[in-house]
Image: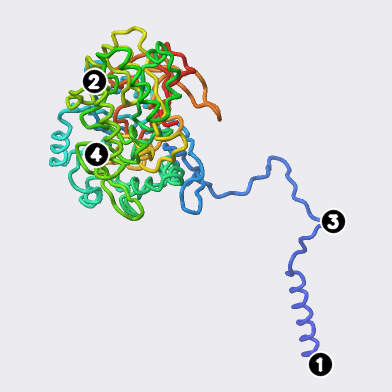
Amino acid sequence: MKKKLAFILALVFVLALFAGCGGKNTGNTGNNAAKPTASGNDTAKPTDQPDTPTEEPSPYNFAIGKYEVNEAGFPTEKYVYELPLSTTGESFTKWTTCYTPQFIPEDGWGSIETWAGVREMTGVIIEYDVVSSDTRSQNFSVLLASDQLHDIIDQGLYFYTGTPLQAVEEGYFVNLYDYTDYMPCYMYEAYTRSLSNNDVMDQIFYDDKTIVSLLGMLVEPAPGTGHVVRQDWLDELGLGKAIDITTYDELTEVLTAFKTADQSRYPMWIYNTIEIAPYCFSGFNTIMYATQLSYIRVVNGEVQFCGTTDDDRDAMTLLNSWYSKGFIDPNYSAHTTTFDSSSLTSTGNVGVMPVPPSAIVNMEANNEDPDCRWEAIPTTKKTDDQILQYGHKLGNFHFGSAVVSTKCENIPLAVTWLDWWMSDLGSEWTSWGPEGIIGSITKRASASSPTTYSTTKQVWHGQCASTAATALLSSACRYTRETMLIPAARDSSKSSTFGQ
């Protein structure tokens, strides 16, 4: 009996222990919930938290990962860079040239206002090696053979004797395809231009996974050459405006009037190559570049060489008639492209010439007649309603280009710096520099009216070799359309425009 009683007491004691050690009710029931108190010198201490690492801001303002792409993987809009691109003070070497080295200032190429401004904006330091244009090929060969290529090389592919792919495979140039995420402005331009010109991608890509050179692009592609006419002669003879001369028959009438007014003239200028660019005789759907048969066309599936077709015969028949009428100098085979230095073009013997629009200012300045005024005529056709089928496809690229050497220690930054040239700000600055030095804006751009410029200085520190005021051999630079130039002291409402 005693054992039973002892067992029952022990069981009751164990149950009491479990009740006393049971889980605590965390719910707040009225005012009976226990509250912590602090008294005397006791103060509540915060709970210890693990240290959160602070991310240091990047010294680079790379574009990678900061923009949207379309289904094809190209940027959906032009990227706007946050400047400076770098705060590290890093520098790159850049191999380039200058056609007017006598104008390079004593402090060097980098002290020119345009390039000093690029350095200030981007934070990237460039050490320029400005090589004579006459010795570039030899200089490049020496650098290549001695494994001393510069970080950035203007027109590198032009001087490399192998293929672009070989330049990559042999370890000389960087395959920029691997860095397209760092060049959204260039890739955006490539895609948008390819929508209207299927040749663009073939020029940018060597193959599906190879891009070796960044190519300079024209802001607004336009014919680089076209016919200009002496507007002051038209005014004297009451022949109207240059812009109204649209057909070969109308041009023939103008030439006839010019010759009749002065029999000593040879009013139609023809080069020894007949054409210097495939724009002057587009109305015949051919290219009459006389020194070679390198231009081909395809008509109804048949490959034809320009210079051998019926259209070429018709074009040459027209030229022969002009020659027979005394419109063309019998010594035309001696006429080279140095048109602005010819005595014939500066003494009032020539009334129609095929030239780049940027040449107009020089031609007027060099002419003995102070009233000389050249104006461009539209692309000449057989009839006003003719649809041009060949020889008038607009190019998107300029001769400027750049490659990045594998010797470069910070390829992403070098590529970013080049891509900034393709941005709206970079393009405008590298094309024109600070306003008021080589050009001044006379009218701001709008949806219906592009920006126009007045040139104020013909040659500026060796940066420009013509009044076009575009940076010569500037790597990856988008060039402002030359036909938008309004020569200083001229009526801006009569700007020269080709290809209308």
What type is the residue that disc 1 sits on?
Answer: Met
Between disc 3 and disc 1, whose residue precedes?
Answer: 1
Residue of label 1: 1
What type is the residue that disc 4 sits on?
Answer: Gly
Measure the alpha-carbon separation of dots 4 and 1.
111 Å
Between disc 4 and disc 2, whose residue precedes?
Answer: 2
Q: Residue furthest right?
A: 30
Residue of label 3: 32
Residue of label 4: 156
Q: Quadrant of the C terminus?
A: top left
Measure the alpha-carbon separation of dots 3 and 4.
85 Å
Q: Are marks 3 and 1 in contact (CB under 8 Å)?
A: no
Name the residue at 43% across, 33% down. 220
What type is the residue that disc 2 sits on?
Answer: Thr
Residue of label 2: 100
In the rendered view, would you say 413 is above or below 99? below
